[in-house]
Image (spheres, coloured by chain):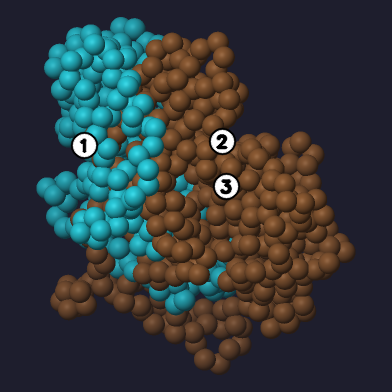
Chain colours: A brown, B cyan
Amino acid sequence: MESDRSHRASRRRFLGGVGAAVALLGSGRRAGAATPDPAITELPDWTRYLGEGVASRPYGRPSEFEAHVVRRNVAWLTASPESSVNFTPLHDLDGTITPNGLCFERHHSGVAEVDPAKHRLMVHGLVERPRVFTVADLKRFPGRANRVYFMECAANSGMEWRGAQLNGCQFTHGMVHNVMYTGVPLKAVLEACGLGPNASWLLAEGADAAAMTRSVPLAKALDDCLLAWAMNGEALRPEQGYPLRLVVPGWEGNMWIKWLRRIEVGDRPWHHREETAKYTDLMADGRARRFTFIMDAKSVVTNPSPQAPLVHKGTNLLSGLAWSGRGRVKRVDVTLDGGRNWRHARLDGPVLPLSLTRFYFPFNWNGRELLIQSRVIDETGYVQPTKQALRQVRGTSSIYHNNGIQTWHVHAGGETENVEIS
Amino acid sequence: MESDRSHRASRRRFLGGVGAAVALLGSGRRAGAATPDPAITELPDWTRYLGEGVASRPYGRPSEFEAHVVRRNVAWLTASPESSVNFTPLHDLDGTITPNGLCFERHHSGVAEVDPAKHRLMVHGLVERPRVFTVADLKRFPGRANRVYFMECAANSGMEWRGAQLNGCQFTHGMVHNVMYTGVPLKAVLEACGLGPNASWLLAEGADAAAMTRSVPLAKALDDCLLAWAMNGEALRPEQGYPLRLVVPGWEGNMWIKWLRRIEVGDRPWHHREETAKYTDLMADGRARRFTFIMDAKSVVTNPSPQAPLVHKGTNLLSGLAWSGRGRVKRVDVTLDGGRNWRHARLDGPVLPLSLTRFYFPFNWNGRELLIQSRVIDETGYVQPTKQALRQVRGTSSIYHNNGIQTWHVHAGGETENVEIS
């Protein structure tokens, strides 16, 4: 590559930019510095030589300098990689859209690599006209919709029930992503099949080796569920259910059945494995809450955080994400002193219902220790609780639905860790 | 791989889904069909065997079944791939967000592969305090913003000035993409440097071997320009200016300087090569319009189109994109008969200013010939013109700013081609 570049080095005249940079040295950001900054006095290779042409990457990929920005798994967390999870690098991202290559994965029997030409969706049970649809059939429905939704695993932050655990928001909160889905409202497909008089629940089933199945109340299906084939403009990624997934806005990710092949309409829930043995909330007294579908309001400071510590004394910008399964984010408060003083953060970018919302808070850091938290209030007035408040109701045996306030302890040197304060 | 999968074939019990599918055969979509559909009677491999685990793809990629969804170049169009263009596959996408890997590329000396640690932005000229910024410096500004904007090359549809040319919306309209940018308002950075009393224009310069330079009116810079480091949540892609690009909402893409290294503030435009020899509009009388910055309202039907012809007789859903450099899309009209009858299309998804907007129009196809067009009206009342109307004013010597109405001729067999009608 380098030899290829060197023999076609640009012969263009050395233009004014760099010369001007040299002239500017006395007034640069390090005013009065004796040693010129080589970054502005030396012409870099990328200015001296032609770069790669347009034919080289039909499907693009990130810069090699961003190779650390990846989904990460925790090897000891699960018995096998086929029934496991990896996590979105929230601390390396900004805005509200999650790029498809970084959306966390959770699957129960590995990634089904489905041939879309052979894939079918069957709708049967308490319907007047049971039908089998191809993906192309679904794309001909007139009501196609594009909606940005967060998708959060019910187990996100689940390790935190018993106290501060993994050191990074990627691991404590990275089972959430936010993309624009394209699909057809499930309501339209159900109406095409004709709902029977006693229809009140659905069973959705995936085509993967786990045949993931969940019961979904019909009212939710008719409200805002989508049968989606695209995310952020392109086809679903295989690990997100290509070619078809159920979108259940604001509700726990396990219900968003991937590789969706079957919807059965019934008059009661099915009580399958993933809604009895799993995805229930074990309480302190040994009883389990079931069908706790909604993901309550939650927020996390993504920067600074253990993987992205403070390095600069002076002005900094705190950044984070907030969301609610009950609607829009109304307000986010931030504290730097463990909750003694709360300030309103600024929400920025589109504030869409059931969608990640970005917040910012500027602050000055003089090298002192900080205890950073964020707290979201959604449009229903619900206030994100403390972890202690959650434990008073649910104990510490739960895995799911931990939406408690997260604390980052910034040490005097900038190092940041996951802690709990009482 | 296959041998690896076969010895760990799932031993899970053969559950109800497929059995139910077999039972459903008599009521399937081809009711009364004698031959069962093997897609629902045979258990596919992806249900029988475990798939890949979560550790296999730290940064995800599309399904192998989507390998045809790529940026494409036109080899004969330019002399070398380093000063060339490839095109977004609009006919394969939906919604409004363009995934980063499919955003069209246009560069003049190849892709600069910039080391962000060595990259600097210098701001100088008619400012009180010339400064050099690192990307980290810019990330500490308090006013960080996230905005979804379309970015269109001024030459998009440029080959159409002399009549219908390339056969596909990817090639006629694929020099446009739409992502969420994260960055700092340029206004904040300029104010940090202190604008001089006569400041009225900027020169923005890139760090690539072309040292791309464009003059930008200060009023635009202070209005809504961003210095952006992220797109769709992650760092800019190298071909989109990593680590820093100028975002000039609604204005021609050539001004969105990539690999941005220098902003000089002055009191008049610079008349550099890319705003004199190029990126001007040659009129029929030999004079050239200059500084035609704004991308006027435009739309295109993406489906059906030459690369995505009609295949299904009966109900179909027409889909397309509309945008305006002057604000929001207000309305899109669609015709199937070459303009004799126009109908309102349905806008779907967020309708954001200076952003791609998706439209849909359901129609029934009985196999007849169609002449399909779309026409956008933006919030200023501007109506997308015909190509003939544009040529009456500008002749056929222009390359840039062709926002005329596009026509697709659907033949009786469904084959679709790029045509002009008078």
| Image depth: mark 2 or mark 1 in front | 2
Q: Secondary structure at mark 2?
A: loop
Q: Residues within 10 Å of mark 3 (few under 14, many from 20)?
A: few
| Residue pointed to by mark 1 | B159
Counting labels gives 3
For disc 1, the chain is B
**Horizontally, is B88 left or right of A284 in the view?**
left
User: Is there a contact, CB below 8 Å, between mark 2 and mark 3?
Assistant: no
Q: Which residue is the site of mark 3?
A: A277
**Which residue: 38% across, 32% down?**
B17
Pick the residue in front: B391 or B372: B372
| Residue at figure coordinates x 44%, y 77% from the top left | B118
Q: Nearer the viewer, mark 1 or mark 3?
A: 3
| Residue A396, x across and y down, in percent | 73, 59
Q: CA distance from mark 2 to mark 1?
A: 60 Å
Residue at x 52% of width, y 43% of height: A273
Q: Position of residue A395 (x, y in %)?
A: 76, 56
Identify which residue, A402 or A318, lies in the foreground: A402
Cβ–Cβ under 8 Å for marks 2 and 1: no
- Give the residue furthest to the top: B340
- Left or right of B348 in this view: A325: right
Image spot of residue A376 (x, y percent) = 74, 49
Q: Amino acid at mark 2?
A: His
User: Residue B405 or B370: which is nearer the viewer?
Assistant: B370
Disc 1 marks a residue whose amino acid type is: Met
- In the rendered image, residues at marks 2 and 1 fall on the same chain: no
Residue that badge 2 annotates:
A271
Whether residue B56 is situated above or below residue B19 in the rendered picture: below
Question: Where, by quadrant of the figure, is residue B133 drawn?
Answer: bottom right
- CA–CA distance in space, label 1 to label 3: 62 Å
Disc nearer the start of the sequence (2/3): 2
Q: In the rendered image, which quarter is residue B92 located in?
A: top left
